[in-house]
Amino acid sequence: MTHRVLVIPGDGIGAEIMPHVVRVLESLGLPFAFDYADLGGHAIDKHGTPLPPETLTAARAADAVLLGAVGGPQWDDLPMDQRPEKGLLGMRSGLDLFANLRPALLFEPLADASSLKTELVADLDILIVRELTGGIYFGEPRGVTVDNGGRRGFNTYVYQEREIERIARVAFDLAEKRNGRLTSVDKANVLEVTQLWRDVVREVHADYPGVQLDHLYVDNAAMQLVRQPKQFDVVVTGNMFGDILSDVAAMLTGSLGMLPSASLNAANQGLYEPVHGSAPDIAGKNIANPLATVLSAAMMLRYSLDEAAQADRLEVAVKAVLDDGVRTADIMPAASTTGMRRVGTDEMAAAVIAALA
Ligand code: IPM
Ligand code: MG
């Protein structure tokens, strides 16, 4: 059973980190077949489009896609539909990757890296489940027109009942396997589409009596996330609210360089990528933290490749490396550095490989 993985290094630190992570995967001794494709800024330069059709074809044929990151300032002034981000959005919709899993997990040795007080975030373990192929990101009509001499910009916030139902089921399933609590986030006091969201989530709840469900308005959810983050277990929400709240949750852990994500379709095919971006300002300097991509690879093993034991093994290796005091610059504490060793991208990956052995 060969695991066919499409590797998309992408732009900035994504391209820099990916060869190291592929080496980490190879050291697991599994039957991988790696294929490579272009996406984002790099694809614009090479093929004139952020999502070449052959990339989508290769992704459909793979068991999973491992992505570095896309984007950079040199492509920011292109028209909206030609920007690197469009490549990513096209992959999400082209593969129907509707379920985006964004864990915000605080690694114990990094507790003082959070901007919140240590006791508020110690052992934090939240999972944000974000709907990824609908909502205002994809709703039609959209655009900017000129009316009565003035410009008018508009987007459409729309969800079909079945889109809400399928993401709710993913979230309930995950809550069942975790601590049995699910918070659904909406703006049902103002937006009809999210009143439907709330109603459908409540209906699906009937099939999950073991899960405790509550509902929060998005403004309150944002506040609660920074006030008392440990009250949350699994959070389910729509595309745009999930975009925003997952950045808040990421920052709670104080280490954006550590956070993985998974985007899955109904067949458990998935796209796995670190939450951090392409960070062009630090690219090529051998200082980027490869661990978010390593942990994304662990999610890939668990959710798309049916290799849960290997996923655990990889996560244990990452913890061991942190416990040993190995640190890239972004997770090096400002104050006490006793017992810590500052390393580059390459040495961090090598330390993970050594811990696996
Ligand atoms: C994310 C990013 C993307 C999004 C951008 C790059 C299109 O912010 O994955 O959270 O908004 O979904
Ligand atoms: Mg985002």
Image (cartoon, rainbow, N blue to C red):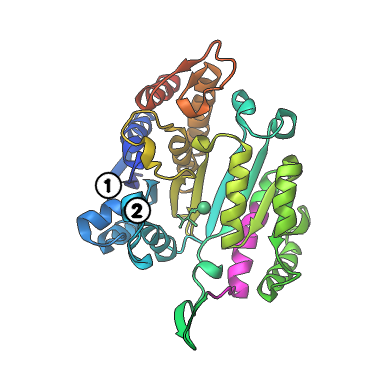
Name the element at disc 1: strand
Question: Alpha-carbon neighbours of circle 1 within 10 Å: few (<14), some, or many (≥20)?
Answer: some
Residue at image coords 62%, 44%: 249
Is 258 placed above or below 196 here? above
Question: Alpha-carbon neighbours of circle 2 within 10 Å: few (<14), some, or many (≥20)?
Answer: some
Residue on which disc 2 sits:
62
Residue 119 in the image: x percent, y percent?
74, 29
Q: Given contact means CB atoms under 8 Å apart, are the residues at marks 1 and 2 in contact?
A: yes
User: Left or right: where does residue 335 sit relative to residue 201?
Assistant: left
Q: Which residues are magenta?
A: 155-173
Q: Where, quadrant-wise, is the C terminus in this rendering?
A: top left
Residue on which disc 1 sits:
35
View extreme (bottom): residue: 148
Residue 75 in the image: x percent, y percent?
32, 55
**Residue in the foreground of this view, choosing between 196 and 218:** 218
Tell me if residue 163 is in the magenta stretch.
Answer: yes
Residue 343 in the image: x percent, y percent?
41, 20
Instruction: State which tag comes first along the sequence, 1 or 2.
Output: 1
Tell me if residue 242 is in the magenta stretch.
Answer: no
Name the element at disc 2: loop
Residue at image coords 34%, 28%: 286
Residue at image coords 40%, 19%: 354
**Residue in the foreground of this view, choosing between 21 and 135:** 135
Residue type at mark 1 is Asp
Which disc number belongs to residue 276? Answer: none
